[in-house]
Image (cartoon, rainbow, N blue to C red):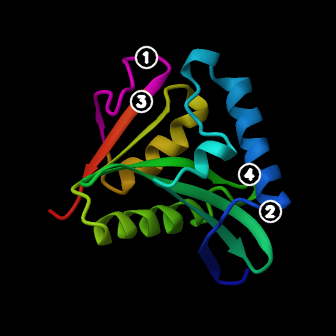
Amino acid sequence: MAELTIAVDDLSGARIAEFLRGHTEEMRSITPPGSKHALDLDGLREPEVTFWTVLDGDGLVGCGALKELDAGHGEIKSMRVAGERMGQGVGSTLLRHIIGVAVERGYSRLSLETGSFGFFAPARGLYAKHGFEVCGPFAGYREDPNSVFMTKVLGT
């Protein structure tokens, strides 16, 4: 296993498009239509979103994004780790990177929405391990039994 590289990605490559297509299809198969909040490629290309890929050598092993909600609040979007790499620290490495960027930008809070189903338990555990706590809906989200909202206060 080579050292992981995290790099900003402009989402123009076929490999990341296919990786995200797999993510979207998986989310669609698990989450009811009105509860799916994953951004598509165009949404991830919006100017308020920074998107990263995680590479192990030449292999694409993960991705994630940070969306600026306002000058002090960011949202984690599209965190995904390749199935064969789950449990190997890729998610933690990327999450620490995103938290670091949020701190550098001066955000006071970082939030996310994830699923409430058992499938999402490892993700919720990862976020909790890094100091995220369950909270109410934010940034236009609504209460939804299929969603869990989490937030982390930064800089304290």
Above or below, 42 relative to 12: above
Which dot, 2 or 4, sits closer to the camera?
A: 2
Q: Residue at x 80, y 77 (%)?
A: 58
How far apart in space, not on screen, are marks 3 and 4 (Cα)? Answer: 22 Å
**Reading the chain from its start, which is encountered first: label 4 or label 1?**
4
Which labelled disc corresponds to residue 144? 1
Q: Is residue 127 above or below residue 87?
A: above
Relative to 27, 16 lies left or right: right
The percent position of residue 69, horizontal first and vertical second, equals: 35, 46
- In the rendered image, residue 103 lying in the magenta stretch gets the answer no
- 3 or 2: tag closer to the N-terminus: 2
Which numbered marker is on residue 83?
Answer: 4
Amino acid at circle 1: Asp
Q: In the rendered structure, find residue 148 and report the number of the disc placed on it.
A: 3
**Are the residues at dot 1 and dot 2 in contact (C-beta closer than 8 Å)?**
no
Give the side of residue 117 with respect to residue 153, left or right.
right
Q: Is residue 134 magenta?
A: yes
Q: Amino acid at mark 2?
A: Gly
